[in-house]
Amino acid sequence: MFSPRSAAGSGRRQQQQSRAAARKSVSGAANSLLFSPRRTPLSARSTPTRVQNLASAESVHYDVQTFGSSLPVKVMEALTMADADDQISVKVDESGWAWMVCGERLIIWKICQTAVAKLSVCKELQLPVSEYSHTADLVAVTAATAASLETASAQSVSVVAVTTEGTARYWPSLAHEGKYTETDVDLGDLCNFVVAVRGGSFVLSSVRNRLLRASADSSGKLQWRALLQGQGVLSGIGRRVSSLFGILSPPANDTLHAVLWEGGASCLYTLTSSSLSKWEMDDSWEHQLLSWDARRALTDSIADAIWGSESNYEEMKEGANVVYLDMKLSQAGVVVLAAAWHPSDYPCVSYFCLVTLQDSGASISDHFTVEVTKYNPPFQSEDTLQTTRLLLPQSPGSTLHLHPRAGVRLLHGDQQGGAT
């Protein structure tokens, strides 16, 4: 998950050549991957029937085409001059802002701009020193004022970049690249996500699921405080009573896999190895609405969907491994990307699954759907699985995308029944 620097003096990160080659080239058309959704919702308390994987009757090819205006010159130069062992990562925000991390360089620009406008909105920032490779997941932008980020100018856009160790560099205005403050944030562990939330503030998270909310004071320096989780939200009452509110204390060994901000509802979602949590946020406060036990509810249902027809299913279920990788919001609900494998399978493959949960606001319904995709590559390691991310268009019936580091996989179908 984290790539430490190579020995002092090299200035380069260690990275497998296969990943570097994949980054440098654009792969051809991906295969179409059909999935067969479960047509009847599952209940966490019921025994689901196994999903039947239907084979594709014909192959479908996809064209990769350019979108919007050309990339800024700074971005093209960085890509051209990058060495094979440079780790490059990119994120595109729904507001139209994009940023690329290449070595210790951070380039931020606004997509779909005219040639003249791109000169003023494309900025290069210097990232703080780190023993680990920098990544776009640890960068976030927000509007410093009440202005919407979609229409904000570079003058009113604020940027934060955090190292894996927890050094946060904050630029109050993107228009002034050389003016920033630096703060050491105590996460107690390695930082893995940074997201912009309400009130010009940010949420920083650690691998072990510690969450901090950071915002700038009048001097431009970041101040931070911890988000209360589990029993801390309902201080003074017991675990049994707090569970009635749908909020449980996180396990000590919990690992955070995804953080998602839904600006329309002002809600923050987190997905760990054991639970799905949700916070309601305002400009200056937050309130945890739920912490849903995903491991208890989903593991058996996912195992049943894959191996449920096996004669020795009850025995196999005990050895099945299920991990959660990513999540996105759709019109159908909260979609969780999971992967499962069984060490006794030969060959041992990874089954990628989509779980659609019904979010009623303050609770997650016990009725959900499990879809086993046709994408089941050979199992390599759990770390390899954790690099896979989900792209999910908002409109139902659209193509879904899984993008491991080596390419993009397309799953063509809809989420509301039937493969297409």
Image: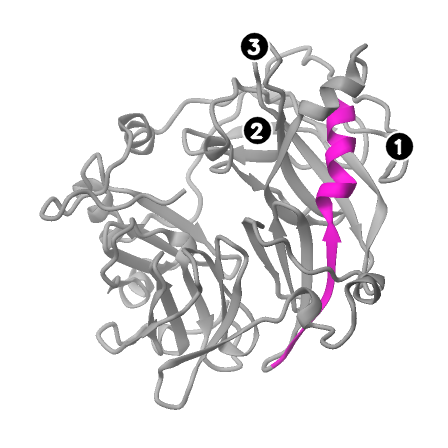
Viewer-proximal residue, 381 or 42? 381
The residue at 71%/42% (across/down) is: 295
* Label 3 Cα neighbours within 10 Å, binned few <14 / some 14-19 / many ≥20: few
Local SS, label 3: loop
Position in image of residue 172 (x %, y %)? 35, 78
Q: CA distance from mark 3 to mark 2?
A: 23 Å
Res 72 seen here: yes
The residue at 89%/32% (across/down) is: 40
| First reached walking from the N terminus: tag 3 or tag 2 | 3
* Label 2 Cα neighbours within 10 Å, binned few <14 / some 14-19 / many ≥20: some
| Location of mark 3 (residue) | 347
Residue 374 within the segment the image draws in magenta: no
Contact flag, marks 1 and 2 (Cβ < 8 Å): no
Which residue type does callout 2 highlight? Leu
Res 419 seen here: no
Which residue type does callout 3 highlight? Pro
Q: Which residues are magenta?
A: 285-306
Q: CA distance from mark 1 to mark 2?
A: 24 Å
Look at the picture and state if 261 lies above or below 87.
below
Local SS, label 1: loop
Residue 230: name its quadrant: bottom right
- Identify the image quadrant of the C terminus: top right
